[in-house]
Structure formats: C-alpha cells, structure tokens
Amino acid sequence: MKQSKNLLAGKRDTLISFGIVIVAFIVVQIMILTGNISSSLKGQLVPICAYVVMAVSLNLTVGILGELSLGHAGFMSVGAFAGIVATTSLAETIPFAPLRLAIAMVIGAVCAAIAGVIVGVPVLRLKGDYLAIVTLAFGEIIKNIVGVLYIGRDSSGLHFSLIEQKFELAEGGKMIINGPMGVSGVTKISSFTAGFVLILITLFIILNLVHSRTGRAIMSVRDNKIAAESIGISVTRYKLLAFVISAAFAGMAGTLYAMNFSTVTAAKFDFNTSILILVFVVLGGLGNIWGSIIAAALLTVLPELLRAVNDYRMLIYAILLIVMMIFNNSGVKERLMEKRAARHAAKQVSKEGL
C-alpha cells in the first residue's frame, strides 16, 4: 500500500514538472508570436532555462542526496568553456548550429562529469559544513584556472598554455580563451527552444533516477547512512553517482548559457552564482523538483518585472525572498500540505468505495 502511494506521488510530481515546463513554453511562444514580450525579458529566456537546469541538478545533490554543495557554478564554468572550445572548433565541420550546440553540450557534460569525479572521490568522504567549504573552494579554483588559461586554434590544431600565452598561432588562427579577458566574439547559437529541450531531458533523466531503485538507494543514504550500509548499499558509490550526474547537467547548462552571450568571462561563474542556484533550490523546497523549476524561473525574471519601480526593485526583490523563505519554513506551508494530502486521501477512499 505504501509503495503504491509512493508510486502515485512520483507520477504526480513527474506530471506536474513536465506540465509546468510545457505550459510555460507554449505561453512564452504565444507571447513572442503576438509581440507581447519585451526585448529585455526575451533576452532572459535562455538564462532562465540554464538556471532551471542548474536548480534541478543541484536539487539532486542537496535535496535528494542531502549533501550541501557550494561549488555548482564551478561545474557550470567547466561546461561553458568546454562548450565554447567545442563549438568554435566544429564551426567549419558542422555548420548546422543546433547540432553543433547539442554536441557541445555533450562535451560540456562529459568535461563537467570528469571534474565531478575528480572532486567527488576525495570530497564526498566529508559531510556537512566541511563538504560545503571544499566545494566552495573548488568553484573558486576553477574560476581562477580559467582566468589564466589560454587556448587558441589554427591549422595545426588546438594550443594550450597557463599563466601567459606561450604559443604562436599560424596565419588564420584564432584565440578562443584569452586568459583574464575570457572569450569574446562568440557566435550565439543558444535558443529558447534548445533550452526547453534541455529542461525536458534533464527532468526525464533525473525524475526517472529519483523514482528508480537507484534513487531510493540514494535517499536511504541521505536518511540513514549507517542503516544503508548495514543492508549492503555502497554509500560512496551512490553519493558519487548523484554528484557526478548533477555536475554533468550543470556542465550542459553552462554550455547553453555561454552560447547565449558574445563575451564570456570566468567571473560570471563565481561564488554568487552558486549561492543564487542554492537559493532557487531552498525556496523551491529540498527534493521538490517542480518547486525548483518555479523558483528558478520566477526569481530570474523578477528583477526584470520590477524594472518599472527601478529605485526600489532590489529592495522589493530582497523582501520577497525573505517572505518566501519564511513561508517555506513555516507551519503554514506544512498545514496546507497536510490538508492537500488529506483531501487527496479522501478522494482515493471515495473512489475505492465506488
């Protein structure tokens, strides 16, 4: 009986998550076609998609696994710059932009996953504040490495160096990453449709993972590590699996985000970005995937919606954040959820009686 209830709850959450995304996509497309969307808001569509993917992927680590990570922007940075290098290198070979973007996202995901393994193997032995501090340090290390990284491409291939440019490019060659100046002259190939597809893929994989046997093992590690070990669950294996999958999707989001701007620097993926994504997850509810979607979209677009009250918009934004945080952790929300669950149970009983 309990297992069937969990399955029903899982299906309901999946339908809600996909429903929110699909309805939002249709509404935005109608607004674009009818001209009822401002240019500033239209420019926020791809970043919103990237932040939604970031929030959902971080929720896998923070909400489902129960480990606090403050370095998620570091994986986003790895995916962003790996994706830029990939799209620049493949520009002549694959002129079709959507296909080139898809390949770049896969490359960004693989690079971020590798970074996740490198960080996760030693770091996931820690927990609580120690894990948060180490992941925060990782994010800053990545930002500083990219800040001194030089990558160029010419007829002989890719050239790399650190600290300073130690290579000469042949005629017709091009610098891709130019140290602290970052990347400039990027061809924008990201689109709202590509972001929509990436969100659907992210939801499909993560929701199926969460509601699978593997997902239940991950949650058992979160709830009681000792009990999980006693029944033969490999704690390190499942923690690393969740962490690496989360990093991979952050890398894909980074590629999508970076290919929406003509200039990208490492400073865009700093500590503040990691905290912002964590705020999305906390406000949406730990372990609540559709809550993360709503929080990421709402809090990204809110400053633009408040532009009419420009002098007070950041003050209003901060007040709304505080109110949402208080409500999210208050007894009011719990009572509302209990009433909703009671109504749902009553409906089920009445159906069974019929």
Image: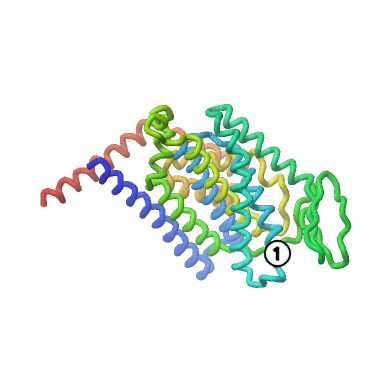
Residue displayed at 53% across by 40% down: 240
Q: Is residue 254 above or below residue 324?
A: below
Residue displayed at 60% across by 52% down: 110
Residue displayed at 43% across by 39% down: 218
**Colour mapping:** rainbow
Q: Quadrant of the N terminus?
A: top left
Q: Is residue 171 above or below residue 58?
A: below
Q: Nearer the viewer, residue 247 or 265?
A: 247
| 178 relative position to 70: left or right | right
Given the current orientation, which residue lies at the most extreme left position? Answer: 354
Q: Is residue 121 above or below residue 354?
A: above
Residue type beneath disc 1: Thr
Q: Which residue is mark 1?
A: 187
**Disc 1 packing (10 Å; few <14; some 14–19; many ≥20):** some
Residue 318, percent from left and from top:
55, 38
| 316 relative position to 154: left or right | left
Q: Is residue 282 among what the camera can see?
A: no
| 18 relative position to 109: left or right | left
